[in-house]
Image (cartoon, grey):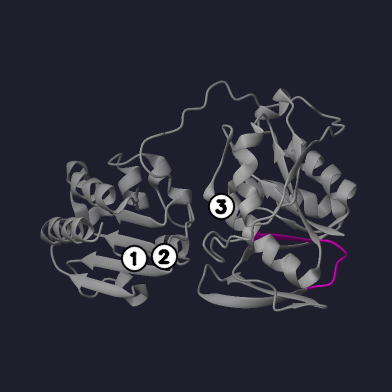
Amino acid sequence: MSILVYIRNVSGQIKKQSLELTAYAKAMAETTGQEVCGLVIGEIEDQALSALARYGISRILKAGDARYNKRVNRVYTQIVEQAVLQIDAKYILFPDNAQGKAIAPRLSVRLNAGFIPQVLDLPSSYEPFVVSKRAFTGKAIANVKVVSERIILTPMLNSFGLKETPVEMNVEAFQPTISEPESRLEIIHKEMNADGVQLVDADIVVSGGRGIKAAENFKMLEELSETLGAATACSRPVADDGWRPADEHVGQTGKIIAPNIYFAIGISGAIQHVAGVSGAKCIVAINSDADAPIFDVADYGLVGDAHTIVPELNSLFKKYLAENK
């Protein structure tokens, strides 16, 4: 048997989350002795897949038909199912994002496989299979035991890290048989923001709330983000008011992220927001209200006016980075 990793194809590119997922699978394989295989769907150059070999994938199945460039979850589920059966995969790994959440449960039903989302670490045991996951919107950790023949996991971003284990890798054409190649829903146009660091791939996120007071004041957050090589985000009220784009909204009702460092600036710390960022390894809060709930979850806190603190922080970071090139 083997381990199958779903490789997310983003307009012909492979992102950090797929590399981390590969490293996670390779660490599992070092214990189980299984081969790590990848599956990528849609048109993509073999060269774009080469980075995966550094993290432990020895075999890639590429369903490169142009028809699959349109992401249709029920079709993708069939493709993954056929790949699982072809290589006899015991463990199937998806990213813990919208695509993983759409495909993994469908696949679980079709394969009668156990499904564990929001996985936080490597399995503590394989016989029986036990792994830890987030529970109660990140306020607790559950140790889950699964007894099914096949097991589907969605490890959270930054739960394991990028650990290189270079291997030789072969890319094989994969031609599944799909019963429903056409979608009932057709995407006419998709526009992605190519500027800056994308939220789901960011190691550092600078996020602002209503405490910033006005849309134009987000300029100082953008400047801090540029200095740190970070992504910019916001709370739901900010997105609802139109101060920032909706795709920057992080929280339980927006994007759930897990960066290494999360700056919460002018954000009170409502439970819905905290649930979406609790996977961050370090939370830095800046707020003028010393009693703001965000300080209850922050690793570091600064009480004061963000309009004074943020520019000063930016200057200090610029100085430090210039001196330590």
Q: Residue at x 51, y 27 (%)?
A: 190
Q: In the image, what residue type sits under mark 3?
A: Gln
Q: Residue at x 82, y 58 (%)?
A: 2
**Magenta residues (range):** 146-154
Whether 147 is among the magenta residues is yes
Where's the N terminus, which quadrant? bottom right
Residue 93 lies in what quarter of the image? bottom right
Q: Residue at x 36, y 36 (%)?
A: 195
User: What kind of element bears circle 1?
Assistant: loop
State the image coordinates of residue 325 (x, y, percent, origin top left).
Answer: 26, 56
Residue 273 is left or right of residue 225, and the answer is right
Residue 85 in view:
yes
Task: State how far apart marks 2 and 1 are (Cα).
Answer: 6 Å
Query: Do the numbered discs 2 and 1 sit on residues whose CB atoms are within 8 Å?
Result: yes
Q: Mark 2 points at which residue?
A: 274
The earlier-in-sequence mark between 1 and 3 is 3
The relative height of residue 52 versus residue 65 in the rendered view (above or below) is below
Q: Which residue is drawn at 25% across and 51% down?
A: 227
Query: Do the numbered discs 1 and 3 sit on residues whose CB atoms are within 8 Å?
Result: no
Q: Which of 220 and 216 is in front in this view?
A: 220
Which residue extends farthest left?
308
Task: State how far apart marks 1 and 3 are (Cα).
Answer: 26 Å
The earlier-in-sequence mark between 2 and 1 is 1
The relative height of residue 2 versus residue 14 in the rendered view (above or below) is below
Whether 214 is among the magenta residues is no
Q: Few, some or many C-alpha atoms within 10 Å of disc 1 (few <14, some 14-19, many ≥20)?
A: many
Q: Mark 3 points at which residue?
A: 17
Q: Name the residue under label 1.
A: 269
Q: In the image, what residue type sits under mark 2?
A: Val
Q: In the image, what residue type sits under mark 1?
A: Gly
The relative height of residue 310 versus residue 125 in the rendered view (above or below) is above
Residue 33 is left or right of residue 314, and the answer is right
